[in-house]
Image (spheres, rainbow, N blue to C red):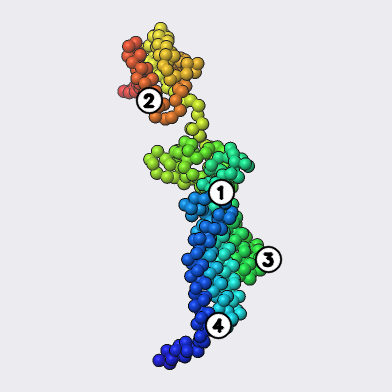
Amino acid sequence: MQQINEIIDNIKAIETFQIIDILIAILIFLIFRILSSVLSYITIRMFKPKIKNKKVIKESAFYAPLRAFYILLGIYLAIIFLKISLGIDENIIIIVNKVFKIVSIVIFAKGLSNSLTVKSSFVNKIKEKISPDIEDAMFKFLLRAIRIVIYIISGFLVVTELGYNLNGLVAGLGLGSVVITLAAQDTAKNLFGGMVIFLDKPFSVGDWIKIKDYEGTVEDITFRSTRVRVPENSIVNIPNSVIANESIINCSKMEKRRYKTNLCLELDTSLEKVEIVQSRLKDFLINHENVISDSIMIRFDDIIDNGMNILVCCYIDFVDFASFIKVKECINFNIIKILNEENVELAYDTKSVVIKK
C-alpha cells in the first residue's frame, strides 16, 4: 500500500509543463514512426534519383535498415527532448548516446551487407567494370569475404563505443592466439582450400566431378566446404581442405568419352577368324554416326592363359553420361552379334585340376 501511495505522490509531483513535454516527446516518436517509410523512401531516392518505381525502392537492401534507423532516431530525439524537463541524469544520457550509436552502427552494417549480393545492380556494375569474366562462384565467395570484413569492422566500432581499449584487446588476443589457432586449424585449412579452388579453378558450380569416394554435381562453394549433389540425389559437403589435397576428375570438361573393352577369344580360334572379326568390328565402328572414326583401335593385344585378347577402343562424341551409355549398349550388342555370326566363342576363365592317386 505504501508503494502505491509513493507512485501516486510521484504522479502528483509532475508539473503541467512536464506532462506537455512528455506528450510532445511521444508525438516526436510517433511522427518518426509513421513517417519512417516515407523518410526511407526519400533517402534512397536522393542517392538513386533515376529509380522511380516504389516497389524497387522498397526492395532495396537499405530500405528496412533505414526504417529501423528513423524509428530509433525518433526514440533518441524524444529522450533528448525530455532531458531538461524531467531532469534526466547525465549518466543515463551518456548510456542513451552510446546505445544510439551502437544500434546505428549495427543497422547500417546490416544494410551495407545486404546490398552486397549478386542481385544488386550496383555490385554487378562494379563486376562488369573490374572483371566481367569472373565466375559466379568466385564472385559470391568474394562478396561473402567483404561482408565478413564489414561485420568485423562494425564489431570493432561497437567495442570502441563501449569504451574498451582496442590495444588491450589486441594484446589479449595475442596471448590467446595459440589456443585460437589450435581450435581453428581445420577452419583455416578449409578457408585456404577454398581460396585454392577459386584461384586454380579445377571446377565450377554446375560441373560434374569425381573426388575421393564421391562424384556428383557441384551446387555451391563456400568458405568451409563444397556442396556436391551425388547420383542418389542427396547432398555431400566435402571440406575444402580435403579437395585441395585430392586428385579431382572434372567430367564436365571432357570433349569426348572413351569406349574400351577386351574380347578374350578362345585359343583354338583360327587367325583368319580373328582377322575377320577385327575387320567387321572396324567397319561397324567406322559407320557408326557417334563414333569418332580416327580414334578407332582394334588390335590383337595379348595372348593370355585361356585365350587371345582383342582390344577394342574408340572415342564417342557424346559427353553426357546417359547418351554415352546408350551408344555403349549399341556397340556391345553389335559386338556380340558379329561374334555369333562368325561362330566365335569368348573364352572363360577355367582351370584344370589333376588329382594324383
Above or below: residue 260 compared with residue 201: above
Q: Which mark is residue 86?
A: 4
Image position, residue 91 (x, y; %): 60, 79
Crowd rating for badge 2 (residues with CA inside 10 Å; few <14, some 14–19, many 20+): few
Q: In whole angstroms, how far apart are the C-alphas of marks 3 and 4?
A: 39 Å
Mark 1–mark 2 distance (CA, rounded to whole Å): 55 Å
- Which SS class for mark 3? helix
Q: Which amino acid does label 2 sit on?
A: Lys
- In the rendered view of the protein, which quadrant contains the N terminus? bottom left
Q: Residue lying farthest right?
A: 167
Mark 1 lies on residue? 50
Quadrant that contains the C terminus: top left
Q: Tag 2, which secondary structure?
A: helix
Q: Which of 169 and 34 is in front in this view?
A: 34
Image height of 296 relative to 155, above or below: above
Q: Do the residues labelled 1 and 2 touch (CB within 8 Å)?
A: no
Give the image quarter of residue 351.
top left
Relative to 156, 257 lies left or right: left
Q: How many labels does the image show?
A: 4
Which label was assigned to residue 116?
Answer: none
Q: Visible in this render: residue 101?
A: yes
Q: Which residue was labeled with disc 2?
A: 326
Q: Which mark is first along the chain, 1 or 4?
A: 1
Which of discs 3 and 4 lies nearer the camera? The answer is 4
